[in-house]
Amino acid sequence: MSKNKRGESDEGPDHIIQRFHDPEWKRERFLAYLRGKFPREGLVVIRTSDGTFAIQIRPIMESRAGERVPEIGSILMHIFLSGQPLDNQMGDLEERYRDKLRKEGPRVAKVDFYRQVITSIWPHAKTFAVRFSQSLRKMGLLILIEEWIRRRV
Amino acid sequence: LVVRRLKMKNSDSYLGEFEELVLLTILKLGRSAYGASILKELENATDRNISVGALYATFDRLERKGFVKSWQEKGTAERGGRTKRYFKVEGTGLQALAEGERVRRRLVPVLDATLATREAR
């Protein structure tokens, strides 16, 4: 575990890095120092069970603007998947998208993301289409449409 | 219906090629085996494009067969805070892998013999 010159430990994201009884102005000054040190992380002041304060570094859960996954792909995933499977798969796709974005550029990342989305939702879309056509057939609508087309042609 | 049920019963212990690859990758990754890392490792090892959807369908099938165990862990900023599904190979999964390997070892000499005959020609 590394220690800085103030003697605090900085263990990285999601860890309590400072526990102190200092007055508020000192805490604020220290927070400003940390914000400079960890510009991409979220800093949270929490009150611990023993009455002292602690600062926690948490990863920012919001995606950074330039690295946000393509919206249409994300919407498609939300249409065909839900709950935990959606959360797991979208998380993996986001991670993969950012990795590709850094290593191979935005174009490759985008193409790969859409390819993944389409191959992921394809079985669900197929099932949906089959069920939809079956229900239409049950209602007799297809037969009516067929009859109508036959008369026209 | 009886034939279908028998087929299903057989398929419960049967390990497909892709399922075997997924199990081996989970074994290789150990404690860091979750969706994205498994996908990356599999693509590197097999040199082919694998879809996340197909991979998750395989995970579900393997879990239904009792070959793997999965659990959720909180996400990181890298994945927009979304949860990670981690995997671990169970004892039955290891047995199935070992059985597959045993069958292969029994049959590989046939391939070796065939190749040797062809080369001799």
Image (cartoon, grey):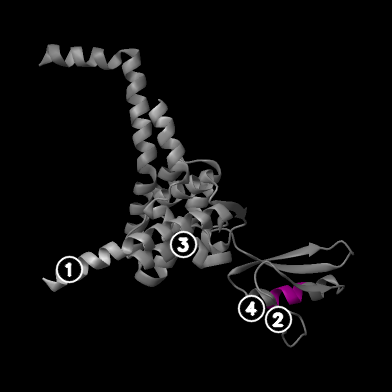
Which amino acid, mark 2? Met
Percent from the top left, x then y, of residue A95? 48, 61
In this view, the mark in front (4 or 1): 1
Label 1: which secondary element = helix
- Name the residue: 55% across, 42% down: A83
As rendered, which of B5 and B17 lies closer to the eye? B5
- Name the residue: 21% across, 68% down: B115
Percent from the top left, x then y, of residue B38? 47, 61
User: In the displayed structure, does residue B10 sit left or right of residue A7?
Assistant: left
Q: State which chain disc 4 sits on.
A: A
How would you rate the neighbour count of disc 4 (Cα within 10 Å): few for under 14, some for 14-19, many for 20 or more? few
Q: CA distance from mark 2 to mark 4?
A: 17 Å
Q: CA distance from mark 3 to mark 1?
A: 33 Å
Which amino acid, mark 1? Thr
Q: Which residues are magenta?
A: A28-33
Label 4: which secondary element = helix
Does the segment drawn in magenta span residue A29?
yes
Residue position for label 2: A1
Residue position for label 1: B117
Percent from the top left, x then y, of residue A31? 72, 73
